[in-house]
Image (cartoon, rainbow, N blue to C red):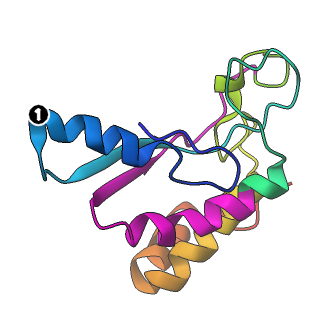
Amino acid sequence: MCYPRGSDVLTGLEERIERADIAYAGKPVWLSETGWTTYRKSGSGGHAATTEADAAAYGAAAPAIIRDHPRVDKAFRFELRNHPPAATSTNSEARFGIVRPDGSWKPQAEALLDVLTARHSSSTSALVEHHGRRGRSS
């Protein structure tokens, strides 16, 4: 796990790799969770919250930073959709999604799609065409 803190996408990653290398030296690393919560109130469960605009900027930068790390083989975004009822939840875990419970896109969903479209234009375009979601943010 690698929990980003603001713009530092790889917070704690080197320390975790060092610990893993004790038993699994040199094995490829998979980031099983990366993302930004947009819960902004106190008592947010220990995760540093960001604004939706900042989460979009960090999320757009993350793929290149992660891709260029020499040990990271795969990375997974946590998570697709906010947990309902995210609007009333006091748990920061409820707001890691890039899609709101009502199906509208947060700015980070658009930003991530733009990055993926630029890098993998044919496969991402087919995905967008299939789901017909582009432009649903609010």
Q: Give the range drawn in magenta.
A: 56-85
Residue name at image x 31 percent, y 56 percent: 74
Asked whether residue 90 is drawn in magenta, I would say: no
Residue name at image x 84 percent, y 47 percent: 51
Q: Where is residue 24 in the image (x, y as percent from the top left)?
A: 11, 40
| Quadrant occupied by the N terminus | top left
In the image: residue 6, left or right of residue 10: right
- Amino acid type for the residue under numbered disc 1: Ala
In the image: residue 120, left or right of residue 115: left
Residue name at image x 71 percent, y 43 percent: 103
Task: Give the residue at mark 1.
Answer: 23
Give residue 86's quadrant in the image.
Answer: top right
Residue name at image x 51 percent, y 73 percent: 116
| 10 Å crowding of disc 1: few (<14), some (14-19), many (20+) | few
In the image: residue 109, left or right of residue 85: left
State whether residue 38 is above or below residue 61.
Answer: above
State whether residue 28 is above or below residue 49.
Answer: below
Give residue 28's quadrant in the image.
Answer: bottom left
- Given residues 101 and 77, the one toward you in this image is 77
